[in-house]
Amino acid sequence: MNFLKVETIINAPICKVWEYWTKEEHVKNWNFASSDWHCPNAANNILVGGEFHYTMSSKDNTMSFDFWGTYQIIEVEKNIEILLGDGRKMKVTFASSDAGTIVTEEFEPEQENPEEMQEAGWQSILDNFKKYVEQ
């Protein structure tokens, strides 16, 4: 299975990026792909075997779903490996650079939507995350 990959460089120290990625009160502020969606609920038990559950919902409440997974590997401020609720694998890496913190997400594509659409959606969420951390 091939993995899709999205990436961004955030102008912030890795400790702040990690905190904003993992704390529920921050996740609610960035975990959506467009301005007509939001993340009204976020629960995150960040330990190996723990789960996260993020409600992703259209603001008009016509669509909603639970994006969730189980943590397989956690290296604080470095690497997270997740088994998503639908059985796909996902990996997030955090790396310091002169330009800031590089966040890379790699994930197995689902079969319902074109890969380009999936990459664009995941990149939009990552861009929201960057904007939120840097504000």
Image: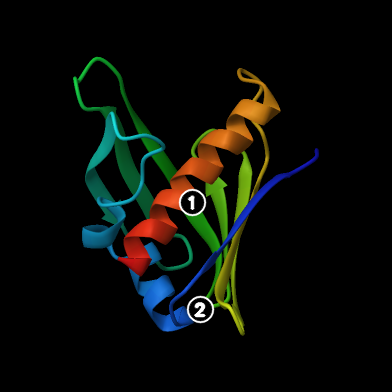
Residue located at (47% from left, 74% from top): 11
Q: Secondary structure at mark 1?
A: helix
Q: Amino acid at mark 1?
A: Leu
**Residue 10, image x and y in percent?**
49, 69
Residue located at (26% from left, 60% from top): 26
Q: Nearer the viewer, residue 134 or 110?
A: 134
Residue located at (20% from left, 20% from top): 61
Question: Does 43 sit left or right of 81 as displayed?
Answer: left
Asked if the residues shown at circle 2 and circle 1 are in contact, with their CB atoms under 8 angstroms apart, the answer is no
Regarding residue 5, the answer to whether it shows in the image is: yes
Q: Amino acid at mark 2?
A: Glu
Regarding residue 87, the answer to whether it shows in the image is: no
**Residue 48, image x and y in percent?**
48, 66
Give the number of the disc on residue 77: 2
**Residue 15, image x and y in percent?**
42, 82
Instruction: Measure the alpha-carbon separation of dots 2 and 1.
Output: 17 Å
Say which label, 2 or 1, has the lower sequence index: 2
Quadrant of image for the N terminus: top right
Q: Nearer the viewer, residue 107 or 46?
A: 107
Q: Which class describes the residues within 10 Å of circle 1: few (<14), some (14-19), or many (20+)?
A: many
Q: Is residue 18 above or below residue 49?
A: below
Q: Which class describes the residues within 10 Å of circle 2: few (<14), some (14-19), or many (20+)?
A: some
Question: Does 40 sit left or right of 36 as displayed?
Answer: left
Residue at image mark 1: 126
Outermost residue, right side: 1
**Residue 32, image x and y in percent?**
36, 40
Tell us which disc is closer to us: 2 or 1. Answer: 1
Residue located at (46% from left, 60% from top): 49
Give the number of the disc on residue 112: none
Quadrant of image for the C terminus: bottom left
Q: Secondary structure at mark 2?
A: loop
